Amino acid sequence: MDEKTSENRFTQSIVFRISILFAAVAVVAITVSGIGIFMVQVELYEDQSIIEMQHIGTMLRDEINEEGDLFVSYQKYMLENSDAIRIPFDFSHDFVKNREEEFDKVFATRYPGMVFGEDVTFEELPVDIKNLFCTYYHAKWFLYFEEMADWFDVPYIYYVYPTGEGTNITYIFDPERTYEGDEKDNRLHLCDTCEESYEDGPYLFKTWEAGHMLDAMDSFDNEYGRTYSYYVPVISNGEKMGLVCVDLDIDYVNSHITRNVFILVLLTGAIMLVGLALLAYVVNRKYISKLDRIATRISDYSAHRDVNTADILETSISGSDEISHLGMQIADMMRTLDAYMKTLTRKEEELTQSHELAIKDALTGVRNKYGYDEELKQIKWSIENGMTDIGIAMIDLNNLKLINDTYGHEKGDVSIRRLCQVICEIFSHSPVFRIGGDEFVVILAGKNFKDREKLVEEFYDQLSSFENDPELKPWEKISAALGVAVFDPSLDAGMENVFKRADKAMYEKKREMK
């Protein structure tokens, strides 16, 4: 009895010491790996942040550019006359809607039968109507920038104009609302101009000077904590208009990374605890047979992924000791892993379907702007590998606003779908994208690239047949302008310039048709 007691104590002492040693090694390994993973994640997230902020900034830049000369005129007027604009501090969409309706009413009264932007330009408006227009237009864009920040879960998105006077910049759309004067006046402060430090924000001024996006961003401390700032220049007709600025809270990001690393450390620790238990079982020789059975069933499951192995394991392990308990847990883990793998498979299928929906235009069924951006990445690879016979056809539906105003937006949607159908039929060998409300892009390659002039002629012939068909409704007699540009290796570094030339050709055609 004494010998057995002494042997048990010795065994327990060895197991205890090995367990302590293993635990110490595990703690060191987990700590070092956790620190390494955190540092790698921070570096990776900085690169991902630039990509995400580029995406947000370019999206807003493109939407500003879609406004064309109207936004340019509005901005120049606001920079000189912001004191004449009155917007409540706590304004909302109702304010924008009311002021827009007021502008439309005043314009219609002053210019009966005329269309703003076509018959009457912004510069031709009297001061009172200019102020009314800028009131609703500025409030609309201000709200849009705020909503985009909420949508993309970033602290601030704002729009600034470097004045050219030293390091002074004007905040056209502020990162947050501030009062003009006292709070009791309930008036929004507009177009605040202040001097920024070049040392704190060098890439703001470098981006402005360069006139294009840079693969770098400012990082600085402010009252809200550590912050990343990225800048996308807005250029209209070759003139630098301003910078779309996107801020990202580094402390917020690091807290998420820390939490994820902590969870990973806990999971790693749990796995090492299982390893510790297995090591203790090996030392305790009287449990070797059970360990062999467990190891055999685990091997079977690893080889065949048969969840029935869990049932076999449970029936082959008996007793209430630690190893039996471990066997039951492993059986449950097999079931959990089996369910988890099935869930992963289902999630993968759902993600595939979600991606297809994300690049698909709901109205027409063709790919959308996001799908077009994805296609450009493939085109870039093709160009780099010598496949330069490629072009872009830019197509824009005419008179959509007139159709919407006269017959309703449902009929306007019919016109858009009808135009899309024609494009898909004519350019049947090319991918078609709807990148805007009434704008389509066709990537010309292969047979369609070679026959592009013939296809353009067929396109206009098809539209002409609609115009001469007395049985068609007005919204079915669609009209559109088409512009084509091809990639020139001696001029073009990518497809951006080709897109611009196609867009320009399309607008020239539109003016010719008018």
Image: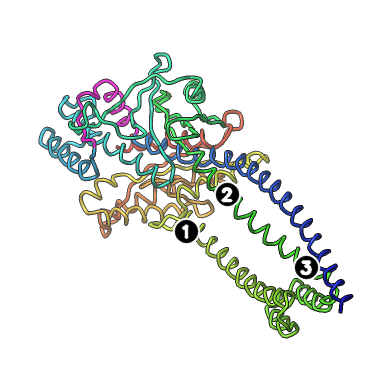
Q: Nearer the viewer, residue 76 or 396?
A: 76
- Check disc 1 and report the residue beneath it: 357
First of labels 2, 1 by sequence position: 1
| Amino acid at circle 2 | Lys
| Amino acid at circle 3 | Leu
Is 12 rendered above or below residue 379? below
Furthest residue toward bottom: 315
Q: Is any part of residue 365 visible from this angle?
A: yes
Task: Please state if 119 lies on the left or on the right of 398 as rendered.
Answer: left
Is 249 rendered above or below residue 214? below
Query: Image point 50% across, 29% down: which residue?
Result: 220
| Amino acid at circle 1 | Leu
Nearest to viewer (mark 2 / mark 1)? 1
- Check disc 3 and report the residue beneath it: 278
Q: Nearer the viewer, residue 344 or 284?
A: 284
First to last magenta residue range: 68-89
Q: Nearer the viewer, residue 461 or 443?
A: 443
Determine crowd level at label 2: few under 14, some 14-19, many 20+ residues with C-alpha closer than 10 A. few
Query: Image point 18% across, 27% down: which residue?
Result: 125
Numbered disc 1: secondary structure: helix
Determine crowd level at label 1: few under 14, some 14-19, many 20+ residues with C-alpha closer than 10 A. some
Task: Give how far apart the Cα atoms at labels 1 and 3 are.
Answer: 47 Å
Secondary structure of the magenta portion, mostly? helix
Task: Give how far apart the Cα atoms at labels 2 and 1 are.
Answer: 28 Å
- Check disc 2 and report the residue beneath it: 447
Task: Give how far apart the Cα atoms at labels 3 and 2 are.
Answer: 65 Å
Numbered disc 2: secondary structure: helix
Q: Position of residue 102 (x, y in %)?
A: 15, 39
Furthest residue toward front: 2
Q: Position of residue 487 (x, y in %)?
A: 56, 36
